[in-house]
């Protein structure tokens, strides 16, 4: 994992709140999660291998939707298992990519 995608640029504040809100909306839309289920996600909540809705095709759809909504480009070599393991990992990826955009 590179330093560019491993740590959030701004761990607090309105920017993180907006990214978090958008990422939860993406998970609701792509995976069909209920509002309640998406709201219950914590940084330690498991994603890939824990949510039956998140299969390999859904991962591709999820990353594509993140690119569209955050106006970013996610290269294949920028994503590893850590980013998809937990909600916090996915949030860190979104934060790093939006900060470098």
Image: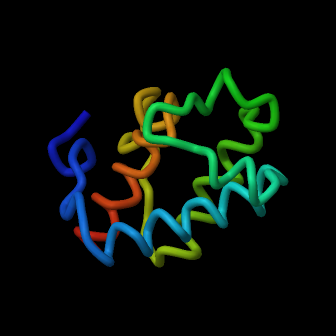
Q: Is residue 39 above or below residue 68?
A: above
Side of 84 where 99 appears, left or right: left
| Residue 89: percent from left, percent from top | 40, 39
Residue depicted at 19% across the width and 51% down the height: 4
Residue depicted at 44% across the width and 40% down the height: 43
Question: In the rendered view of the protein, which quadrant contains the N terminus?
Answer: top left
Side of 95 where 8 appears, left or right: left
| Residue 77: percent from left, percent from top | 38, 40
Question: In the rendered view of the protein, which quadrant contains the C terminus?
Answer: bottom left
**Residue placed farthest to the top in the image?**
49
| Residue 20: percent from left, percent from top | 47, 63
| Residue 39: percent from left, percent from top | 63, 54
User: Which of the 4 image quarters holds residue 9?
Assistant: bottom left
**Residue placed farthest to the left in the image?**
3
Residue depicted at 26% across the width and 72% down the height: 13
**Residue in the foreground of this view, choosing between 8 and 59:** 8
Q: Is residue 50 above or below residue 64?
A: above
Residue depicted at 75% across the width and 54% down the height: 36
């Amino acid at each position: 994992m590179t330093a560019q995608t491993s740590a959030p640029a701004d761990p607090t504040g309105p920017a993180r709140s907006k990214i978090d809100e958008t990422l939860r909306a993406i998970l609701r839309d792509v995976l069909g999660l209920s509002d309640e289920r998406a709201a219950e996600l914590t940084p330690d909540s498991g994603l890939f291998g824990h949510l039956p809705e998140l299969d390999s095709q859904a991962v591709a759809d999820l990353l594509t939707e993140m690119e569209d909504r955050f106006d970013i480009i996610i290269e294949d070599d920028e994503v590893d298992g850590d980013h998809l393991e937990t909600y916090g990992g996915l949030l860190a990826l979104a934060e790093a990519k939006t900060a470098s955009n």
